[in-house]
Image (cartoon, rainbow, N blue to C red):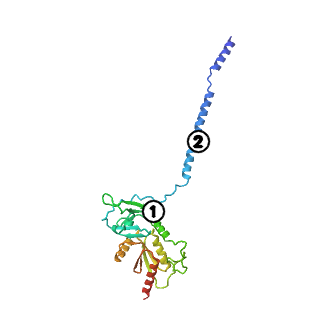
Amino acid sequence: MDSALGTDRTTTMKFSRPRRAPLALIMGALGALCLMGALCLMAAVLVACDAKHDGPPPPASAEPPAPEHLPKLVLKDDTPNLFLTWVSEDGDFHVGHKLDAVPAAARKQVRVVPENRAGTKDWFYVADLSRKNADGSYPVTVMARAAWDEIGADRRKSRLEAQAPSATSAAPSASAAPGTPGAPPGASAKPVAGAPVSAIIYGADWCKPCHAAEDYLKQRGVRVVKKDIDNSDAARAEMRQKLDRAGMGGASIPIIDLMGQLLVGYSPSALDRAIASARNTKTL
């Protein structure tokens, strides 16, 4: 009887013992999955950060950002101390100091530099002098230098295309003087012997005729001094004084002072005459 009872007691204790091993395994598996998920998420974040820093830099802007410090310009008919630049239909840049000196055909876009206010290198004021606001002022915007240069370049291109000889035109003479319209392509001016001659060119970096005049004068043996009216108040004032003295209120740049002879614009033939006159005067 005791053995039977003992057997029964043993059996009862065996089946009443809780089974915890399967639950522990399940919990362990879940913990491992959570840990793996966290590691994968961290790896993805690190890869994304590396791609962000190691990737190619963003493309540079085609033009510099507009200067926030450039103050608003109120432009009226009586606004004093102005330096104006406008582009003619043939692409030449003209300068002046009075609003009424700007011709009607060029009043739509006029660059304005207040002489008592510092400008910027890449941006400047452009006024529409063809209309007025309700308060009597002219509309003024800020334009990038590159856009301003394109206006003159496009008009010069149109002029050259209109002046280009047709296919039936006679070929230019090989004996034409260098620098003249009949000169063959690639011809360069030859230095002229004689007394040394110097010239001052009042212009700007964005003025292509200014660079062409400088190159031509140097080829002719002339010593050239450049004065940038765009960035120098002193150069603008000096040029203005010479123009006023010569009775030229508005003129196209370059303005060239060749040994006291004031020339407006770039003309190889006019430069040749001025150079010859200067050398003849110095030899007398």
Q: Is residue 238 above or below residue 10?
A: below
Towards the viewer: 167 or 248 = 167
Q: Dot 1: what SS?
A: helix
Judged from this view, the residue extending furthest toward the top is 1
Residue 123 location in percent, x, y? 42, 62
**Residue at 61% of width from left, 31% of height from top?**
26
- Crowd class of label 2 (few under 14; some 14 to 19; many from 20; radius 10 Å): few
Q: Quadrant of the N terminus?
A: top right
- Crowd class of label 1 (few under 14; some 14 to 19; many from 20; radius 10 Å): few
Judged from this view, the residue extending furthest toward the bottom is 284
Residue 268 location in percent, x, y? 47, 77
Towards the viewer: 233 or 45 = 233
Task: Report the amino acid beneath label 2.
Answer: Cys
Q: Dot 2: what SS?
A: helix
Q: Is residue 198 above or below residue 94?
A: below
Task: Report the amino acid beneath label 1.
Answer: Ala
Q: Are marks 2 and 1 in contact (CB under 8 Å)?
A: no
Q: Is any part of residue 155 visible from this angle?
A: yes
Between the residue at mark 2 and the residue at mark 1, the CA separation in whole angstroms equals 52 Å
Towards the viewer: 206 or 168 = 168
Residue 195 location in percent, x, y? 46, 85
Residue 43 placement, left or right of 224: right
Name which quarter of the figure residue 170 lies in. bottom right
Per the image, the residue denoted by label 2 is: 40
**Residue at 48% of width from left, 73% of height from top?**
212
Per the image, the residue denoted by label 1 is: 147
Q: Is residue 4 above or below residue 263?
A: above
Q: Is any part of residue 70 visible from this angle?
A: no
